[in-house]
Amino acid sequence: MENWRPAHQQVFNAVSELLTDVNNIRDLKDDFSGLFEGRNNKPESQCEIEQYVTQLMEKLGDNASSQLAEYLLHPAEHYIESNWKNMDGFIADIASLLAVYYFAEHPDESLTQGMIKRLFWILEAYSEGTEIAPNTYLSEEDILQRYCFPNSYDCVRFLLLMQETPAINQALKVAFSGQHNRIIARKESDYAYERRNRSNHNLLGSLYSEFADVCQRLHSNNQFDYDWFKQAVLVHPELVRSYWLEPDIDEVKADSAFSSEFIKAYSTYLKQLVEELDPIENGYALSSIFDYSQTAGISWLKKGLGLIEQYGIKAKALKDVYEHDVSKAAYYLIRCPGLRKDETQAQLIAMLDEFKEATLLTALPYAGFARDAILIALGWQSLLPVQKMLFHWGKGNPATLDSCRDVCNSTSTNSGVIDRSAASEVLAAADDKALKKYIKAMNASSIDLKNYLVLLTAVKGWDKDKLEKKLVRHHQIGIKAYGLYAVEDEAELKARYLKFKQMHKEATQYGAERQANTQAAVKAGLKNLAQSAGYSDEIRMEWALEADIADDMVAFNQEHEAEDWTVSLVMAGLKAKIVVKKAGKALKSVPPKVRKTQIYQAMRAAQDNVRSQASRFKNTLEEMMCQRDTISADELATLSRLPVVKGMLSQLILKSGTGFGFFNGTTDTLTGLSGEAVTIVDEPVIAHVYDLLKANILPQSQQAVVSQRLVQPFKQAFRELYVVTPAEIEAKHDSMRFAGHVVDGAIASRLFQGRNWTQYGGDWVEVFKRFPKQQCYAQVEFPESRHYLAEDDGPMDVIYFKRGNDKLLLEDVEPVVFSEVMRDIDLVASVAQLDDEYGRWSTESAQRRGELVLNLIQDLGLKQVRCEDNYAYIDGKLAQYRVHLGTGVIHIQPGNYLCIVPEGQASEDLYLPFADVDKRMAEIISKIFLLISDDQIKDETILSQINQCAAQSA
């Protein structure tokens, strides 16, 4: 500042004084810049800048006008780099903006001439030198950023603000004429071509609105001539309003900035220019004119088709339209959004008849409204339903230019599942030869439907051998499509089913994300296979096929000779066990000679199969309970052929009509909770804990399970139940029950996957679970997660239920659906938590654990335990204890901490009424039984703690 001219120093100091009390100078500068550039239309900003101008003029005194002119026209002499540490640069810019607004209201001829001179100096010298030293991080083409305010953009805006004069209009006309810029033509190397494009764009190329204003000014003064317009567009094609090629004058009248006569003249010139431009010489200009525009009408589509046919443009050139050339121009021209008001479908088809089949097929994927007409022109009317179906799958419309959404790799088990019966019906009516050409054309394009085309090809039964080769690499769309091929016979169905099982197992070799996606693809493929085989769903297909596989296995409970021993396969609970005997006595280990026998190997295979069935059917039955799926008599009979499933069902409480009972292997009755026969009147469902509570039999159900020492494959009688709270009823649609709980994204993602929730990534994360029978879905929001849930840790937020696009009242959500959703999210909040050292503990979990403890204690006839709130209270012989049902922490009453370290895994003799892994519950039960008989404790470490507390109490 020491070397500044006095006028510059005075202006800067005056503005600095005006801004002394401004908290955020940078925001003020942005507001004023927005006014100047047309980005800010706030009246308060306009008033504020007027007030500052008035105050500035008062501070500068009589020479204010000449000082501001000097400051504005020689910006390099007071340039200060703007940054967040030094506000002086922003103050200098604000001073320049205040000067601009002063002269907009008080025109000065010498200043206007100075601004014109500065504009032409920048345009002429752009390749020779700049005012600001080049920044290391700026490319050679970022020329505009090396000029102080006002740069070339600012000069044009300033001149448009000034009162209109012939000199200003002439200057603006020359500026856009290209006199100081080269015409962009496709003759030099790509690098030079792109550099010239970038340089021109930086000088005037973003003045879109300003260029239209200049054109209208010239038109009103009879200076808007075609030659000038053509030259300007060739230099700056990105400034063209291409939608004025076919303007709707009635709509334009609503925009008071432009007259109808001007727009008609602009449209006439633009049409003439487009007709004259050579697609090779001026490919950049032509493609830029149509870039991002959607110009309706037959004539533009015809021009695009003509370019394809004349220049032999291939599908690959339209697929990769990165460069501005004739291919890109053709690409934009053939994107037809519709017809003009005076045009008909018959006229469109007649025009299309003029072109070759190859030309129409090249354009077809991008043709929007004209896609159906192209099929008709080709004589392929039979493909119209196919095209409609294909775009419907991709959430698109063949008559629009809207983008489609292809099948993607995801954890959704419904992604890639289609209605095979409907697809088969549509495809059966299609001409095969035409269909193959159609598929080839669509595959050669950039349209996002290629995976759906794979599914379509599979329904037709084509390329099966080719697709099977991709299964080796677990190609996910191939896996989904594999289920859509027609089933030849039962043997082929079983072979394909076993192939799916194999791929599901092989997916475990991958990382977490690919494993989850591949296994989801397998499940989607099985859903498609079930349709191909004529089953209602993949679950019923699995039952039937697994039953057939079980029939082929070694029979249970039959002894077979193996060398000098006998071997038999028996069910021990839900596990298959091989029993080896010699002379009628069971052996603890299997002799090497037995292991080599064929019968033993067959039993090992059966063991593995039962283990696999147990895992899959456990999940299937639990999901059926949650989804309220019924089981028919025939299905019960099928399941009875599967020893492991029959065993699972015998441990579960089924509901038929108003009756409840255990499955007993028949299809007529159930065995009631007290041993009585309960007639099956309706197709039974697996009872949910809500059903037991509603029927007022929950305590009896829990007692029946414990007294019979049943091990349910998953929590049923002791399942956590979540009900709508008064606060949620008052909130109506949104539950905030778990809002604010911060979770580990990777852990949360795996937990949601395991509970059949769907996750989509993008600008925001979508996590939801569908309930088809109830025609609704639940969604939980993660407002701070982006791209994929597994990538970010963050808080959970609102939970809601929707049917279609409408949110449901929480109290209207089916109770089982509500409870299961909250149970899943409670699991995530508890296991994936980041912000709680001791773990989250819900009321629902505490209630069920308390009930479990009391049932186990009562079943053994013990009376030393009671449960209140979240604690179990034990009356021991040596002391009284309190055990937390969530953490397992023990206190000797009244409050002394007792440390008991669990010894690894819980004893196999410890009974729990469910097979779900609950290590904490097993630990708590073990501790309670230990403390009941505290006088028999042998561990000196534990005894010393108890005795010390007893001595203190005494």
Image (tube, grey):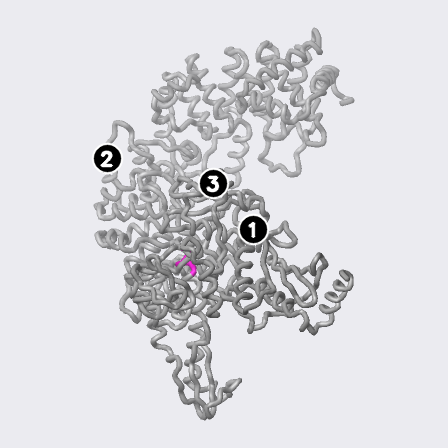
Crowd rating for badge 1 (residues with CA inside 10 Å; few <14, some 14–19, many 20+): few
Q: Amino acid at mark 3?
A: Ile
Of the pair 465 and 498, the residue shown nearer to us: 498
- Residue at 61% over, 25% down: 30
Q: Earlier in the sequence, mark 2 or mark 3?
A: 2
Q: Assign a secondary structure to mark 1.
A: helix
Mark 3 or mark 1, which is nearer to you?
3
- Residue at 44% over, 86% down: 567
Give residue 584's position: percent from left, percent from top: 46, 90
Residue pointed to by mark 3: 729
Q: Amino acid at mark 2?
A: Gln
Of the pair 107 and 567, the residue shown nearer to us: 567
Placement of 719 over or under 298, stated as above or below: below
Mark 2 or mark 3, which is nearer to you?
3
- Residue at 48% over, 56% down: 753
Disc number placed over residue 345 in the picture, else none: 2
Is 729 in the magenta?
Answer: no
Which is the main secondary structure of the residues drawn in magenta?
Answer: helix
Q: Assign a secondary structure to mark 2.
A: helix
Mark 2 or mark 1, which is nearer to you?
1
Give residue 740's position: percent from left, percent from top: 58, 44
- Residue at 46% over, 73% down: 573
Quadrant containing the N terminus in the rendered view: top right
Which picture quadrant has residue 470?
A: bottom left
Q: Amino acid at mark 1?
A: Glu
Give residue 347's position: percent from left, percent from top: 23, 34
Which picture quadrant has residue 704?
A: bottom left
Residue pointed to by mark 1: 791
Placement of 879 over or under 255, stated as above or below: below
Quadrant containing the C terminus in the rendered view: bottom right
**Which contiguous range is marked in magenta?**
622-626
